[in-house]
Image (cartoon, helix red, strand yellow):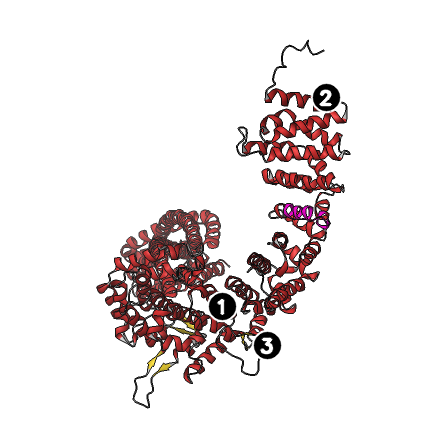
Amino acid sequence: MFSTITTAPAKQSVSETIAVLSGRLSTATLLEDRRAAILGLRSFAKQYPASVASGALRSLIGSLSRDGEDVDTVKGVLETLLMLFNPNQDSPEASEEIALWLADEFTQRQENITLLLDFLDTADYHARLYSLKLLAAILSARTERTEECILVAPMGIPRLVATLDDRREVIRDEAINLLTDLTPASIDIQKLVAFEKGFERVFGIINEEGGLVDGARVVEDCLILLANLLRLNSSNQSMFREMGFIAQLGRLLRAAYMGNESGEKIAQWAEAQRNRNIYALLAVIRLFLVAGVVGTHQNQVAFLGDRVLENTLQLAFAHGIELPIRSEALVACADMIRGNPRLQERFAGLEVPSPLDDLVSNGHDPHTNGVPNVFVIDGLLDIILAVNTVQAFDMRMAACTCLKAYFYKHAEVRRHFLTRAIHGHKIKADELTNVFTTLLQPLPEAAAADPYRYWFAAVLMLHLIHENPETKALAMAVTEGDEASGEEVVTSIQTIAAHLLSSVAKSEDTRVVIGYLMLLLCWLFEDLDGVNDFLGEFTNLQGLIQAAVENPNGDVIVQGLSAMLAGVVYEFSTKDSPVPRATVREMIISRMGRDRYVDKLSKLRAHPFMRDFEVLSQKLVDGGLDQKLPDVFLDDTFVEFFKDNFSRVLRAIDREPGLEISVVTNGVQKGISRELVDSLRAQVAEKDRALQDAEVAKSSLASQLGQEQADHRRTKENGLAELTRANAAAELLRAQLTTKDRLLKNAEALAATANEQLSREKASHQQTNAVYQQTKASYDRTKASHEQTRASYEQVKTAHDQLKAENQGIKAEVTRLHSVNGGLRRNHEEEMNALQKQMDALRRSTESDAERVRRRSEAEKADFRASISRLEVDLMKANKAKSVAEEALTKANKTLVAAEEALEKANKASAEGLSGAEKKSSEAEKGLAEARAQLEAKEEERRATQNELDDLLIVFSDLEEKVTRYKDRLKTLGETVSDGEDEDEDGDDAEEDDDDE
């Protein structure tokens, strides 16, 4: 039967086998065949994950969907997938990229993640457990994409949270771990978990597990999940607070320290887990108390109302609790009261067990363990100043942090604490835990044994007086020495400075020196009275500079702080200080030098303890087993103070002694504000530059204005001169025209008179012809005169005819000139007076001529010629004014009438009347001819004057336009044109208008 089998079948390789199993899984129609293929692939998954994943991953995932109702198939597939995520470490195909590849296959298709979440609804143990583990593996590989897939999956978060109710601890614990990994970063997932009663379920698990004292690792995991849900999530914190879970925290804390007081012995591992649980709960509490976060104040009030603060304090002072837990509890208490005045004030009234083991009951202790209760402030001071073991450093540091939170931004609390400390120092009560007594009366042996006692005392005093002028004044008022007993009275600042220099000289622990330096720096900064008090002892400054330059230990921090304190002393000293400001600077420069001063401060700034303070741990290393003091030298508030004021103190040495600092203390300004001086100096410099620019601009404008004003004055003067000349010329022309007109009328009357006289002479000639012979001799004497008179008559007659023809044109011209020269009327009266005088002179001359004619005819001829000459003068002035000419002609007519009468008298008186008449006629004709010539000359003068007047009017118009432009330009340049000038010009125009009228 078996004879036909001659050889064994060929052995398949691993890759071939995996390929065959993968093909069978994807093509088999029977469930048993697919299950067998899955089991075969599972056997290779641990050792050959890459081969199995590359050949059968999608088939395995497809089996979950196709055969999801079969429990064994689902179990096999999920186990295989988990093996692919966690292969053997010695596998040749093991790689981190396989997990990423697998996670990508699930997260890139939403239905794959939804498929795994669907298995959480089943009751099968393995399906739920392996689905949670597989989701955790995928989440670990592709966190963000897995979170998105779970978040958008139908009922994804509710299904996960519901697994917390599973009574099977393994599934519940796995759900806790998955939710813990799912909630650290996604606020949306945090809110959904809390909304699905996440807080209630977590506290239910904690209570089921026995709370903090009896709970196992799952309690710690629950607290970690709780921390993820509450970290920086104000909405979840608000929900937690409003749903009353704060009270749950208080009950857990109370159970923790009350369970410890039972005195039962527990295993070491259980105690370690208990401490981890308590530590995790304290971490959760501190999440509600982050400074500056919305809701912190409400959380603090809730912690007080639900007795979380009280229970945390009791936990911190419980003797059976390990020191790290107690330290963390004190830090949590500090967070609960920091920045909340109501809690800070109530905090001091709380009572706690005394932290000193050597105290016994005083009869008032309600406890049965023999440890009395003390007020929390006294208990904190006991921890800080009375406990001197190295292992208790973290506890002391936490107690100091708690007191600093008690002082934080509460001036009344600071003042109250400092007042009580001063009072206790004066009555020498509680010397061991009194801050003032510790600083002002140090014990040499105690400084060597416990340097942190003085460091903590200096730090507490620093926080009491920092940026608080009132507490600075209270502290500075404390003195040492009894003046009544003859002791020297020394102020607190000088006492601390003396202890500082003594510590430097004795090379005591650096922490003591640094504590004193930090305190003095914060005390003297912006405190002029404190600086003056410090300089009251001259050796303080000398010793300080020496500590910065010649520190025996060569400690960078001590040297840098000493140099900084010297800079602060100089910065806030004044010329009235005990050591003047200039002397302080001279001492620093001469003994330290600017470069060394800058170098000391720069090295301090670059020191790791200062530079990296925020990232360095300020705690004990290794629990203090080696009895080595921790590397804690600086206080956080001081580090912030140093970094904020480093640049200012660094530049202080470069400021001149004459520049003092102004500090406002209690509303009173002391010193001179350098900022104000610098600001004013900058403003003065800017205004000087602006003033110089303004002066230059002003000079330029002034020169331009002067030039414009000069041009304006010249133009105005020229215009006024031209105007005056034009007015004078117009006035003269008008007077001449008026006179010419008057003379014209006189000439007409004279011509008429002369004609009438000629007629009468002819008649008289006929009448006297009979007596011609008798008067012939007389005629010979007067013949020459008669011929001249006749010639004058002809001239006058000719002038009369010409003047009569031109009279109409002259009248029109005079009318036009009258409208132009209206301003010439004022000079008219003067000219009239002159003409009147001339006419008076003419009248006197005519009268004298008539008298001489009466005496003899030759004299009459001379008078007549004189009269004609004066008529010529009058005719020359005819162009001045028409009215003057008319009057002159009238007067000339009168003169001719007088001459005629004189001639008649002479004819009658003379025997030779006819020959005298002929001579007078000749003279009259000559006078008319001369008058005509004069009229022609006057007409030429009138035309020339008219042309000159037209030119002057044109010039005057141009001058007025130029003056108007200059006025507009001056107004544009900002100059003011006086109203007087406008009024003068308006007045001139008005006068011209009146003259025209």
Label 2 Cα neighbours within 10 Å, binned few <14 / some 14-19 / many ≥20: few
- Residue ID for mark 2: 27
35 sits left or right of 90 in the view = right
Numbered label attached to residue 399: 1
Q: CA distance from mark 1 to mark 3?
A: 25 Å
- Nearest the camera: 982 or 870? 982
**Kind of residue indicated by mark 2:** Thr
Numbered label attached to residue 976: none
- Residue ID for mark 3: 368
- Nearest the camera: 326 or 31? 31
**Kind of residue indicated by mark 1:** Ala
Please determine whether, in this image, residue 928 is positioned above or below residue 901: above
- Report x, y in % for residue 475: 41, 77
The kind of secondary structure element at disc 2 is helix
**Can you name the residue that lies furthest to the left here?**
590
Badge 1 or badge 3: first in the primary sequence: 3
Does the rendering let one see residue 916?
no
Does the rendering let one see residue 2?
yes
